[in-house]
Amino acid sequence: MLYGIRDTLDELQRWRAIARERGMSFAQAKITVEVGYIEVGLTDRTTLRKFSTVAEPRLWPSRFLNVRRMTAGLQSEVLHRFSKYVEEAKESVDINMARVSQIATRPDLFERLFQDDIDFQANLDILVIPVADSPDGRIRQLAFVRPGAKIVSIEQGSDEAEIILPAWMNDDSAEKSTV
């Protein structure tokens, strides 16, 4: 899902224009997900682990993390894992994968990060990730929403289409290991 006002407005404008050009309809929805308390400072591994000190997951102070709000050390850990994943897949390791900003070029690897890293897996419902997939090289932010995340509200922007979420998005019993 798109995250943040600027990225969302830019994308909505772009897709509305494409729909208009093609004579198609455009539907949108605003989905609000419970995230708990959002850390004011940057999040490091210790802070991430602190989220799970309460026995009941729904009472944890935060279920949300933005990659851009992680410490450089935690971002470097993510980059190291991504480099390892690429190497294990026998893909050519791009020289650019040596810079933290390049994790935005491989959003597909965040799913594996959730599966492999116990702190991400156990402590987060939403991870805002940078994605660099537009032809102009612009990086946008997307919210990676895990199964079982608590959806608070859905506001549909059009009555011309019905928006139906996948069952895993509102199933409290969904396995956290499934992404």
Image (tube, grey):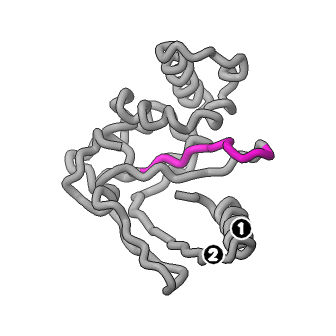
- SS for dot 2: loop
148 relative to 163 in the view: left or right: left
Seen as rendered, the residue at the extreme bottom is: 159
Label number found at residue 24: 2
The residue depicted at 38 percent of the width and 29 percent of the height is 117
The residue depicted at 19 percent of the width and 54 percent of the height is 173
Q: Residues within 10 Å of mark 2 (few under 14, many from 20)?
A: few
Q: Residue 6, located in which quarter of the rendered image?
A: bottom right
33 relative to 16 in the view: left or right: left
Depth check: 59 or 103 in front?
103
Magenta segment: does it hold 100?
Answer: no
Magenta segment: does it hold 130?
Answer: yes
Q: Which residue is mark 1?
A: 18
- Residue 125 spot, x, y in % from top left: 38, 50
The residue depicted at 62 percent of the width and 43 percent of the height is 130
Q: CA distance from mark 1 to mark 2?
A: 8 Å
- Residue 89 spot, x, y in % from top left: 48, 17
Q: Residue 68, located in which quarter of the rendered image?
A: top right
Q: Residue 51, located in which quarter of the rendered image?
A: top left
Q: Residues within 10 Å of mark 1 (few under 14, many from 20)?
A: some
- SS for dot 1: helix
Badge 1 amino acid? Ile
Q: Which residues are magenta?
A: 126-136
Q: Are marks 1 and 2 in contact (CB under 8 Å)?
A: yes
